[in-house]
Amino acid sequence: MRFVTTLFLLSSFRARSLLLVPQRPTHHPADRKSLSSASSKSSCATKLFSANAISANGARNDGAPNSDSMKINYGPSIRLGKLKLNLFGAIIGLWEIFCGVFLWYPAMALYGLARAISSKLPGDLLSKIDPYRRIPINFGFAWALLSYSLFGMWPAVEGRENLEVLRVVDENGKKGKLRPAMYVANHCSWMDIPFVAWLFGSTNYKFIAKAELNKIPIVGRAVRVGGHVMLDRSNRRSQMAAYKAGVQWLKDGVNLVTFPEGTRSKNGRMGSFKKGAFKMAQAVGMPVVPITILNADKVQPIEYVFPAKPSWNHPRAVIKIGKPITTAGKQDDELLEEVWQTIADELPESQKPAKDTPVGVK
């Protein structure tokens, strides 16, 4: 799968993951009890403070590294610089490198060449056949079916029924496809990317990815050919172009995916969210679908270059799909807090935000 190969290369280069533009942080008020319950927005903020600081058994989340990963026996491993590689990781790594070099890269290169040639011919036939660049997505899904089956990498998916409110139903009651939305997920492992991609199957989607990925062999071509939104966080022009591209994809009926923390968590706990993705959804009135990813950091801990165990082994990786959240009539901060809290509520204690974690940054 395209993003499994991305996983390998990103791990090798230790690049940061998909993100939106980080700016100056904004914190909640220090006095939590001063928040007024009379206001719905204040009530949401009060809930945010109580949920992210206190665990179910009364213990506070102190931001310590996830101790659960220490209880998992990944077997013997070797050191590759600062990273580890065990037997399972070596096998799956060799498989993905082989497929990436000899299958995925040639296929994406051929598709890119075909689009370039087609664009110079009268009528641009390929752009008419595949205007939203869905062919690379379908090719990646076929690869995922094979890879996930061989190595037991399927995450459990819960809450698909929550997406039914997005389904188009005609006047005769016939159900159609789901309306597009902005999908927002927490980010604690390199495996989050292929897990979320697996969630969509053959349905078209685009990630919001940082521009630096263009420089990485195979990954850069895959991102460009797939039509994913590229963002250079240091360039204002790139920020505006990414915003316009994201909005256009939503208008065209294509789902957008982002990890609004902006980078992968170093200790497994969810961090603050950035506002960029929410502004895109608000601009076109599209709902935001909260996605909670559990135990991806157990499948591939931060110190491992490749996945260290199958996803279906205990603790199993799980993707929980929340109920779509409407953007109509909501301020930026209110929408961000609601999505952040929805995801945080579904996380296990080892992944819940640490005490006093700011909910959002501008």
Image (cartoon, grey):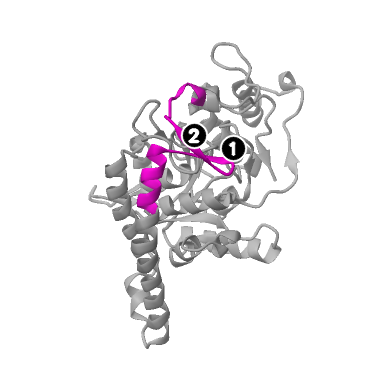
User: Helix, strand, or loop for circle 2?
Assistant: helix
Residue 202 makes an appearance in the image: no
Query: Is 293 on the left-hand or right-hand side of 198?
Result: right
Q: What amino acid is labelled 2 in the image?
A: Asp
Residue 131 coordinates in the image, percent (x, y): 38, 70
Packing grade of label 1 (10 A; few <14, some 14-19, many >=20) is some
Q: Marks 1 and 2: in contact by CB < 8 Å?
A: yes
Q: Is residue 77 magenta?
A: yes
Instruction: Find residue 285 and report its horizontal and vertical position in percent.
Output: 52, 51
Identify the residue position indicated by label 2 in the image. Answer: 297
Residue lying at the far top of the rendered structure = 57
From the image, tell me which residue sits under label 1: 265
- Where is residue 300? Give x, y as percent: 47, 37
Q: Residue at x 58, y 33 (%)?
A: 270
| Numbered mark located on residue 352 in the image | none
Q: Residue furthest bottom?
A: 122
Instruction: Report the Cα–Cα distance between label 2 and label 1.
Output: 9 Å
The amino acid pointed to by label 1 is Ser
Q: Horizontal placement of 142 versus 70: left or right?
A: left
Q: As displayed, is residue 62 above or below residue 233?
A: above
Q: Residue at x 37, y 45 (%)?
A: 92
Location of residue 34 (image quadrant): top right
Q: Tell me residue 297's x, y (percent).
A: 49, 34
Per the rendered image, the range of residues in magenta is 69-96
Which quadrant of the structure image shows residue 335? top right
The residue nearer to you, when weighing 3 against 272, is 3
